[in-house]
Image (tube, grey):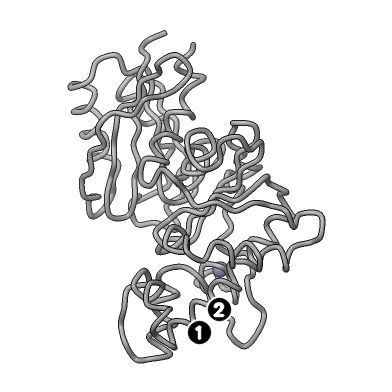
């Protein structure tokens, strides 16, 4: 065993977060979380510099766990197709491991959020946890008995393009489809829809907060809750989780409407999965970092 600590990294479009998590008996304990702006252009060389600096400052790191925006294949290739953080498709973990001579495991950031919340956050005690992050976009991850289920191609849980609405309210999605969750309930979608209704620009979290006093916001939020509930009801039928953990800035901002969301999800879902639970994420930005540490746990034990 080369060390009892994991250096955990979360690569987002705007910030890179890092922390060292140390295994003490049966649980990881997280150290101070450092945030730095994501570089413009390709992230790989600046990431290598960051990791070298962190490893110099912290002794006893036995593995590096990385969550990244974008899609990660089971082979470890990070797709460059849907994020401009990578100039080309890269097998990021293998490349970094060769440079740093440490095991480096890489997975999608929302999948790691689901893993972190399943073991250390709102999903504790559930066997099957479906983490859904609604922020500027939509993503998801599935955890079965403490293990991340990445599916055949690495994208299990990716629920952004599940159809949430099939009425005249359905919106075109960048994927080519219409009425996808991401096109209907993401932060960017909420802001676009509000602008189309009122001509005003507002942040999605402010629109959600103003729904009690602002008529157009109330109408929009009512649609968003119904559409998200429809999407979750569909996912519940396919995956049959104990429950969903709702994260991301929009997911957390929906906390006051959780009972309504739960009720509408139950109304929509197939009878056998109507009791699927719904909780709001507890760990905030730390969830991905806990997930990255859990991902490395087996490597750490070797
Ligand atoms: Zn789509």
Q: Secondary structure at mark 2?
A: helix
Q: Residues within 10 Å of mark 1 (few under 14, many from 20)?
A: few
List x then y, in percent, for residue 189: 45, 74
Q: Are marks 2 and 1 in contact (CB under 8 Å)?
A: yes
The residue lying furthest to the right in this view is 271
Q: Quadrant of residue 83?
A: bottom left
List x then y, in percent, for residue 78: 45, 44
List x then y, in percent, for residue 171: 54, 80
Q: Quadrant of residue 74?
A: top right
Image-quarter location of ligand 1: bottom right
Query: Which residue is identified by label 1?
Result: 219
Q: Please tell me which residue is depicted at 56% across the width and 71% down the height of the picture.
A: 225
Q: Is residue 289 left or right of residue 170?
A: left
Q: Is residue 89 left or right of residue 50?
A: right
Q: Is residue 117 left or right of residue 30?
A: right
List x then y, in percent, for residue 54: 22, 27
Q: Is ligand 1 closer than 8 angstroms to the Cβ of mark 2?
A: no
Q: Please tell me which residue is depicted at 23% across the width and 43% down the height of the picture.
A: 35
Q: Residues within 10 Å of mark 2 (few under 14, many from 20)?
A: some
| On screen, residue 32 above or below 237 | above
Query: Which residue is identified by label 2?
Result: 223
């Amino acid at each position: 065993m080369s060390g009892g600590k994991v250096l955990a990294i979360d690569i987002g479009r705007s910030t890179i977060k890092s922390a060292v998590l140390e295994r003490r008996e049966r649980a990881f304990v997280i150290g101070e979380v450092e945030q730095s702006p994501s570089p413009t252009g390709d992230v790989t060389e600046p990431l290598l510099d960051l990791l070298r600096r962190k490893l110099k400052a912290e002794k006893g790191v036995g593995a590096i766990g990385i969550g990244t925006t974008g899609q990660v294949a089971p082979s470890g290739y990070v797709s460059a197709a849907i994020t401009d953080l990578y100039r080309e498709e890269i097998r990021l973990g293998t490349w970094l491991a060769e440079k740093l001579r440490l095991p480096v495991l890489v997975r999608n950031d929302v999948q790691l959020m689901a893993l972190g919340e399943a073991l250390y956050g709102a999903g504790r005690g559930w066997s099957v946890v479906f983490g859904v992050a609604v922020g500027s976009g939509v993503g998801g991850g599935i955890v079965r008995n403490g293990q991340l289920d990445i599916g055949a191609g690495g994208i299990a849980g990716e629920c952004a393009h599940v159809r949430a609405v099939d009425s005249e309210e359905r919106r075109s999605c960048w994927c080519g489809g219409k009425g996808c969750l991401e096109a209907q309930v993401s932060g960017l979608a909420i802001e676009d829809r509000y602008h189309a209704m009122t001509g005003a620009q507002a942040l999605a979290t402010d629109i959600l907060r103003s729904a009690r006093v602002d008529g157009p916001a109330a109408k929009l939020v009512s649609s968003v809750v119904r559409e998200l509930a429809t999407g979750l009801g569909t996912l519940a039928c396919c995956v049959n989780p104990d429950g969903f953990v709702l994260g991301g800035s929009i997911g957390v901002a929906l906390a006051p409407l959780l009972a309504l969301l739960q009720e509408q999800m139950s109304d929509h879902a197939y009878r056998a999965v109507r009791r699927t639970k719904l909780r709001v994420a507890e760990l905030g930005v730390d969830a991905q970092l806990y997930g990255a540490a859990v991902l490395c746990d087996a490597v750490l034990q070797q």
